[in-house]
Each structure stands twice: as structure tokens, then as C-alpha cells.
Image (spheres, rainbow, N blue to C red):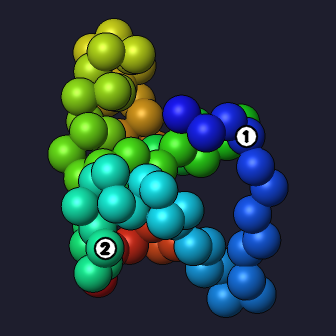
Amino acid sequence: MSGIRPYQVSSSGQLSLPAAARHRWGLDKGGPVDVLDLEFGVLIVPRGEGQRLLGDLLGHDAHARYVQSLADDPDLATA
């Protein structure tokens, strides 16, 4: 782990994933990631890890409430 470093978000909401993470996750040519909005912050993890982490961090009922809270948020629509 390389520690905490500040990054700039563009006016269109884009953020570059650090090169070390892209290499480690096999994303040198791009690819999908999971983004978890934890309300107090955002966590970006390799694709498929988000569900596992939520399962580890939240109980079933809390996870169900979290998923339901995302249903009506148009900003979270995926392409």
C-alpha cells in the first residue's frame, strides 16, 4: 500500500486510478471496478470485490437497506 495521496476530480466527475493500482489489478488497458459509496467516503476496489466487502462489513438487513437506497439514485446508473 502506498498510503494516502490527494487526487483531483475533474469537473465532469472523472478521477484517474493510480498507475500502481491499475498494474496490480490488471487494468493497464482499462476495465471495470466496483465503487462503494459509503456516505462518508467512496471506496474503489477491483470488480467483484464490492459485493464481498459489503457482505463482510454489513449484516444482511443493513446490506438490503443499502441496496434499496441506491435504487432511486439516477447518478448511480451504469452504462
Helix, strand or loop for disc 1: loop
Tag 2–tag 1 contact (CB < 8 Å): no
Residue positioned 61% across, 39% down in the render: 2
**Residue furthest left as drawn:** 48
**What amino acid is labelled 1 in the image?**
Ile
**Crowd tier of the residue under label 1, counting other residues whose Cα lies within 10 Å: few below 14, some 14–19, many 20 or above:** few
- Residue 68 figure quarter: top left
The image quadrant where one finds the C terminus is bottom left
- On screen, residue 44 above or below 7: above
Q: What distance separates the C-alpha of mark 2 from that of mark 1?
A: 21 Å
User: Mark on residue 36?
Assistant: none
Q: Which residue is mark 2?
A: 28
Residue positioned 49% across, 65% down in the render: 19
- Residue 22 figure quarter: bottom left
Between 61 and 32, the one lying in front of the other is 32
Q: Which residue is mark 1?
A: 4
**What amino acid is labelled 2 in the image?**
Asp
How many marks are shown on the rendered structure?
2
Residue positioned 43% across, 54% down in the render: 21
Q: Is residue 71 visible?
A: no
Q: Is residue 55 left or right of residue 9?
A: left
